[in-house]
Amino acid sequence: MLPTWADPIKQAAPDSINADGVFKILRAWGTASASAGLLKEHRNLIKRTVIRRIGKGIKLTSVGVSSARELRNASYQRVRPFMETCESMIMPINQVSSFDTTSEYPTKINGLRIETYIDWMKHCHYIRSLSLPAAPIPCGFNPEGLPIGVQIVGRHHDDFGVLQVGSAF
């Protein structure tokens, strides 16, 4: 028997079109804004992936950043009605299980090459780009004995609701 808070469980997903591109643009812009000076002074101490992100952020125009912010707002407006139909979502945190610490990041998912070094955690940045509250919850182990987690995602500004579902989970 399912607990009352989980009844009925339905499988559905909000429209997350543009979330990936919006996240990457705004992340590059934010990193460049905060770290461009460090790049000039300490380039030899910064990881190449961060150097590339700062470089992308420096090349952005105000029109590009404004467009990304408008797309983020439009995405939020599309997701808002969906979130009115459910109190929370439970979804994977990452697209891959824990990986060997000798690897900087996974380069493939299910045998397919990933585009960027953060694509193995798209579910997290989709949610972040929508400004929805989320909490990671451990939920078990994969066949190799490595930990697996899910994220509880709630309605806008419902951090307390996310914590309540996480506690019940």
Image (spheres, grey):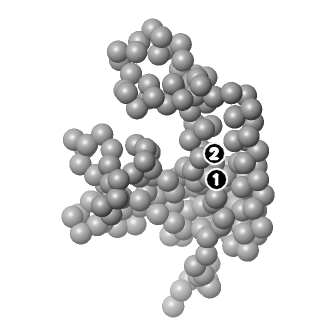
Up-down relation of residue 133 to residue 116 (above or below): below
- Please give the name of the residue rendered at 64% of the width and 53% of the height, measured from the top-left corner: 18
Residue 73 appears at what percent x and percent y?
76, 49
CB-based contact (under 8 Å), mark 1 and mark 2: yes
Estimate the x, y position of residue 67 in percent, counting from the top left. Answer: 73, 40
Query: Can residue 167 be seen from the camera position used here?
Result: no
**Between 1 and 8, which is closer to the camera in this rendering?**
8
Please give left or right for residue 100 compared with residue 22 in the image. left
Q: Give the SS element for disc 1.
A: loop
Q: Position of residue 104 (x, y in %)?
A: 30, 40
Mark 2: amino acid: Val
Q: Quadrant of residue 49?
A: top left
Q: CA distance from mark 1 to mark 2?
A: 6 Å
| Residue 22 tag number | 2
Q: Which residue shows up at 66% across the image and 64% down it?
A: 15
Which type of secondary structure does the marked residue at label 2 adopt? helix
**Number of other residues with Cα within 10 Å of mark 2, as a class: few under 14, some 14 to 19, many 20 or more:** many
Q: Read off the residue under disc 1.
A: 18
User: In this picture, is 35 found above or below 112?
Assistant: above
Who is closer to the viewer here, 136 or 129?
Answer: 129
